[in-house]
Amino acid sequence: MNDREEADLVAESLRGNREAFESLVNRYQKPVYNMAYRLLNNCEDARDVTQNVFLKAFRNLEGFDPKYRFFSWIYKIALNESINLRNSRRVPREVDERVVDGHPLPDDLLRSAELSREIQSALTSMDLDQRAVIVLRHSRHCSYQDIAQVLNIPEKTVKSRLFTARNHLREVLHRRGVL
Amino acid sequence: MPNEYYEELMSAEIDGELSKEEKTLLDKHLISNPDAQIVRTQMNKLSEALDQVKEVEPPANLGKDIMAVLPPVQQPGASAVRPRFRATRLSILKYGYAFAAGIILGLILHQVVTKRATTVDLNDLYGSMAPRVIGGGWQPADGMSFTSDSLTGSVQLAQLGSTVVLEFDFDSIGTVEISVRYDPQLVQFAGYNQKTSGNLSITGGNGSLSLGCEDNKQHFLLVLTSPQKIPTTFNVEFLVGGKIVDARALRTR
């Protein structure tokens, strides 16, 4: 689906075409859910954020400026919703990870998931600002320009923030023997 | 130039955002600096690893749930589309359905048989970003279901090789305490995964686990290992408001 088709779907949605909006939901529910999951590290939170993102998008569809790309608009809402949800919690929610008395999970289960788990764990050790640039760049494959638009920061800041985030991740993962 | 400058160039190189001059500068620095070469290798490996992280599958019905809470028809020309439901209605709906489903499931399980063809989903054992590493090899071993005024749900015991999983799925009214006891010579506690929200707390770990959670829907897995692979018993006890409401012995095969 290209930008033109998406703009058409937005226009159709604004004319009351429910199926058009459903197409946008179908197209973006997975990216939005993944983005929220990477930022919040919790499936239930990611689900709540995704629902709220589309509800807000639907309510504010008239505010969407077609000169921007739809995904950067929806990602911006997703980021804000994720931040709001995190800030609304006085106590951080339990993350989807093994914990307790330090016993590792069985080796055969652990091996193939280790890298992903380590990365997600390292991600959660960073500020949400840094996490966001990594997620947008590596999970959503956004360009510097796209990231700048979503985060409302200059491209130069995207570049330096990516460096800081990667350096942090590199050090954490190196210490853990992953890199 | 400080090392940080060159490391920032390495980061930009990953994204293909280096100018020709910057690329030349970086290459020159790398030739004479082995430490920088190590950093660059690590940076590239990190980038590859980040790109390899698997996508998480959203819940199957998420799209339908989203559409269900939107207004049925969007008014043409309206300045802003106002939903008939408030945002908070989302969670009310979701948990309402979950609660109803829990009661129905509990009744069915209570009347039929406790054992079922369990397909324990370990896809999100480490967080749902984990790739699917387990096929359909999990064997249901035992189970229990319970329906009372204060507690409805089930516990399923499944095993695969030396790994044993206790899957708890229930709704409660009132604080729930659960005791799980087993032979520490045969079984070790390996970890847990909380599949729904809730303030689950776990203490113990050497032959006895004490779990506590507040009143609401709970769904979590306890993962244990049984290296000797011999049949063993798990004594599971549920207390609500300090009173025992159910106690069973579940046994592996």
Image (cartoon, coloured by chain):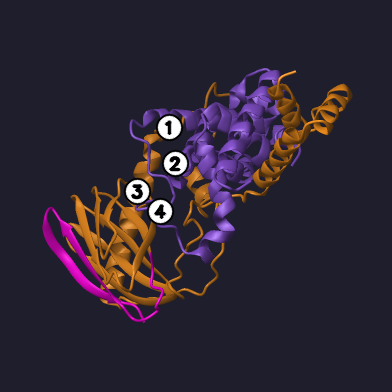
Q: Nearer the viewer, residue B250 or B84?
A: B250
In the image, residue A119 sits, relative to residue A164, either above or below, namely: below
Q: On residue A45, which mark appears?
A: 2
Q: Tell me how far mark 2 sits from mark 4, CA to CA.
A: 11 Å
Q: Is B123 situated left or right of B26 in this image?
A: left
Q: Dot 2: within a 10 Å radius of its alpha carbon, few (fewer than 14), some, or many (20 or more) residues? A: many
Q: Nearer the viewer, residue A152 or B43?
A: B43
Q: Tell me how far mark 4 sits from mark 3, CA to CA.
A: 14 Å
In the image, residue B225 sits, relative to residue B63, either above or below, namely: below
Residue, disc 1: A85
Residue, disc 4: B195
Q: Indicate whether residue B238 is drawn in magenta.
A: yes
Subunit ID for the residue under disc 1: A
Q: Is mark 4 on a helix, strand or loop?
A: loop
Query: What colour has chain B?
Result: orange
Give the residue at the far left of this rendering.
Answer: B243
Q: Is B209 situated left or right of A49 in this image?
A: left
Residue, disc 3: B95
Discs 2 and 3 share one subunit: no
Q: Magenta segment, which residues?
A: B224-253
Image chain in purple: A
Q: What element carries label 3?
A: helix
